[in-house]
């Protein structure tokens, strides 16, 4: 039996609802496909912060390092500063384990109410740089509370960082249509963005079947809303990729649908799988959360661990539950989180 040790961090808000839903599906898939998935549940997140003053224990990264993958729900709590919840858990994990690719599929799903997606099928991949760029701790605040109060935040692009994510995106594009779009803002951001463009261009030059188009991110945002079906693989910096992928999921019907894989493509470290959405405190605890983003992230985890058949089975099951009208309210249906999960479990057996 293939056995994998998975660290599970449900985290905050709706993470506590969608993670158990996805684990129930993963356990059933594991039983059917004879996979050993050993889940270790780690009670980390904002409740841990409120008790101990930190989002995870001091040796949290060491505890995670011995696992084959990490399955995360959401982080964020109205009583905890957002900088603490993000920089105290998710960002250190992405960095420590060199998860420099954040792969975010944007795809039309049958059964989801989305006027735009109904026009033409959408099937694109956003490759977000995940370790550097605008997400940087370099900077500071001065003269707090005075009229001259100021803040500086540095963006950092390295040749290594940009080229490795561009390689990943180019090889994906090469296996698909050969069309790669790189998000830029090099007309306004005159040092880092032209550097990003140059390194992407050089890297993609090594892939004869791939053509890269550099699109200004404002125009690309409009492109993503007006004609998303003409895009295939999009590579973007940390911040731009985050924004574009939220927009992409909204275009397909709901951010609750969107999965993501924070990948260490070299395989030296565990990768992390999480839905794109956050903790949604406004609907937490009400049984309204859409578990598709979490379940789909579980399918991406199975694929990453080498179980394509099991991943396809799980993917087909949640797609069929949506197609059969079992969607949650955000996608135009009436099901609760548990009703939708029950429909996926039934589709797994079908
Ligand atoms: N699903 C994980 C989560 O809660 N993400 C919320 C968030 O704020 N993410 C920021 C990011 O991906 O950079």
Image: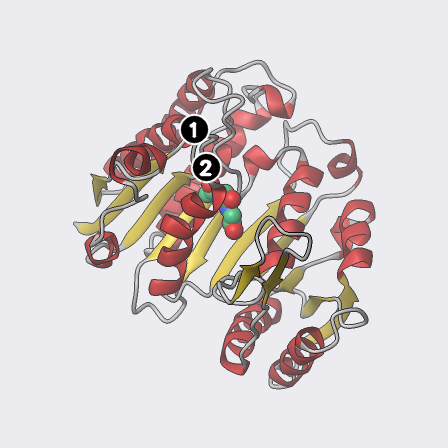
Residue 76: which disc? Answer: 2
Q: Residues within 10 Å of mark 2 (few under 14, many from 20)?
A: many
- Residue at 51%, 67% in the rendered image: 138
Which numbered disc, 1 or 2, marks the residue that appears first in the sequence?
1
Left or right relative to 279: residue 303: left
List the residue tagged with mark 1: 13
Q: Compared to 221, does 133 lie above or below?
A: below
Above or below: residue 217 compared with residue 5: below
Closer to the camera in the image, 239 or 180: 239
- Position of residue 75 measured from the top left corner of the image (x, y, whole percent): 43, 39
- Label 2 C-beta lies within 8 Å of the nearest ligand 1 atom: yes
Q: Is mark 1 within 8 Å of ligand 1?
A: no
Give the quadrant of the C terminus. Answer: top left
Residue at the location (65% across, 20% down)? 332
The image shows residue 66 at horizontal and vertical percentages of 19, 57
Instruction: Specify the label residue 260 is tagged with.
Output: none
**Residue 211 appears in view:** yes
Query: Is 110 displayed left or right of 281 in the figure?
Result: right
Report the residue at 67% width, 65% height from top: 177
Residue 173: which quarter of the image?
bottom right
Query: From the viewer's perspective, is residue 94 above or below residue 166?
Result: above
Furthest-left residue in this view? 1
Label 1 close to label 2 by CB (< 8 Å): yes
Secondary structure at badge 2 equals loop
């Amino acid at each position: 039996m293939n056995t994998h040790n998975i660290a599970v961090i449900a985290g905050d808000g709706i993470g506590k609802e969608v993670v158990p839903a996805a684990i129930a599906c993963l356990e059933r898939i594991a039983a059917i496909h004879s996979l050993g998935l050993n889940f270790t549940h780690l009670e980390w997140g904002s409740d841990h912060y409120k008790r101990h003053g930190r989002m995870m224990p001091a040796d949290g990264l060491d505890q995670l390092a011995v696992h084959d993958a990490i399955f995360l729900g959401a982080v964020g709590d109205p009583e905890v500063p957002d900088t603490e919840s993000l920089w105290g858990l998710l960002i250190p994990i992405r960095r420590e384990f060199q998860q420099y690719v954040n792969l975010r599929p944007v795809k039309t799903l049958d059964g989801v109410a989305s006027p735009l997606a109904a026009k033409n099928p959408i099937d694109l991949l956003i490759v977000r740089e995940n370790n550097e760029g605008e997400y940087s701790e370099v900077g500071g605040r001065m003269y707090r509370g005075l009229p001259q109060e100021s803040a500086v935040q540095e963006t950092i692009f390295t040749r290594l960082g940009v080229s490795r994510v561009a390689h990943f995106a180019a090889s994906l594009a090469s296996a698909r249509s050969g069309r790669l779009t790189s998000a830029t803002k090099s007309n306004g951001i005159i040092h880092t963005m032209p550097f990003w463009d140059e390194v992407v261009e050089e890297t993609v030059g090594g892939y004869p079947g791939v053509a890269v188009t550099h699109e200004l991110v404002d125009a690309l945002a409009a492109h993503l809303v007006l004609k998303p079906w003409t895009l295939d693989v999009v590579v973007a910096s940390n911040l731009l990729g985050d924004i574009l992928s939220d927009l992409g999921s909204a275009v397909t019907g709901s951010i609750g649908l969107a999965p993501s894989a924070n990948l260490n493509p070299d395989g030296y470290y565990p990768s992390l799988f999480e839905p794109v959405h956050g903790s949604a405190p406004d609907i937490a605890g009400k049984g309204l959360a859409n578990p598709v983003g979490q379940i789909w992230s579980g399918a991406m985890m199975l694929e990453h661990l080498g179980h394509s058949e099991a991943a396809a089975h799980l993917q087909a099951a949640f797609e069929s539950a949506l197609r059969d009208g079992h969607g949650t309210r955000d996608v135009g249906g009436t099901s609760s989180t548990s009703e939708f999960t029950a429909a996926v479990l039934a589709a797994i057996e079908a």
